Amino acid sequence: MDNSAATLNYILKKFNITFGRKTPMPIEIPNFGRDNLASLFAELGFKTGVEIGVETGAYSEILLKNNPGLKLYSIDPWKAYSGFRDYTVQEELDKLYKDAKTRLAPYPNSEIIRKFSMDGVKDFADNSLDFVYIDANHSFLNITQDIIEWSKKIKVNGIISG
């Protein structure tokens, strides 16, 4: 029996979503935020994931708290660069990195990777991750690159979101 749509079928049933040829993609689940997503990952038995765009590590911590057996890779360059307007002072980013390290230190299954997304993606084999959560640079080009490259790393029945 082909089980390649098990995650999709689980989500459609859980949230009572009718899916057909005219269903708009991506699927939106009303009143469902990223904190709920962490619990869904646990329900699905996800054990290996990546968060891209970590800042202070707050969402990484939510993922780890909701999934005690999760191996989570938290990827962020914490580096000021041209075109990134959110933070322009390197000292501010260094403080955010320190905050993330402190916040995630109690979690033995947490690994912080200080790299840009397109450099970090090279560290993972194709079909090796249960999920990738993208909250990095929100420019169209960067989002497109993240989705294209990181989707290759997702296992069958995995989820890429953000």
Image (cartoon, rainbow, N blue to C red):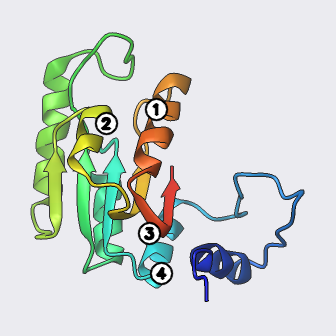
* Mark 4, residue position: 44
* Mark 1, residue position: 145
The label shown at residue 124 is: none
Q: Tell me the SS state at disc 3.
A: helix
How many numbered tags mark residues here? 4
Return the disc, 3 or 2, that comes first in the chain's sequence: 3
Closer-to-camera residue (140/95): 140
Alpha carbon of mark 4 to alpha carbon of mark 3: how far? Answer: 10 Å
Identified by mark 4, the residue type is: Leu
- Residue at 84% from the left image edge and 58% from the top image edge: 23
Alpha carbon of mark 1 to alpha carbon of mark 4: how far? Answer: 26 Å
- Residue at 21% from the left image edge and 31% from the top image edge: 78
Q: Tell me the SS state at disc 1.
A: helix
Where is residue 54, by image quadrant? Answer: top left
How busy is the neighbourhood of tag 4: few (under 14 within 10 Å), some, or many (20 plus)?
Answer: some
Identified by mark 2, the residue type is: Ser
Give the farthest residue toward the right: 22
Alpha carbon of mark 4 to alpha carbon of mark 2: how far? Answer: 25 Å
Task: Establish if 114 lies above or below 161.
Answer: above
* Mark 3, residue position: 38
Instruction: Report x, y in % for residue 153.
Output: 38, 54
Task: State yes or no: discs 3 and 2 in contact (Cβ < 8 Å).
Answer: no
Is residue 149 toward the left or the right of residue 33 in the image? left
Instruction: Report x, y in % for residue 94.
Output: 13, 30
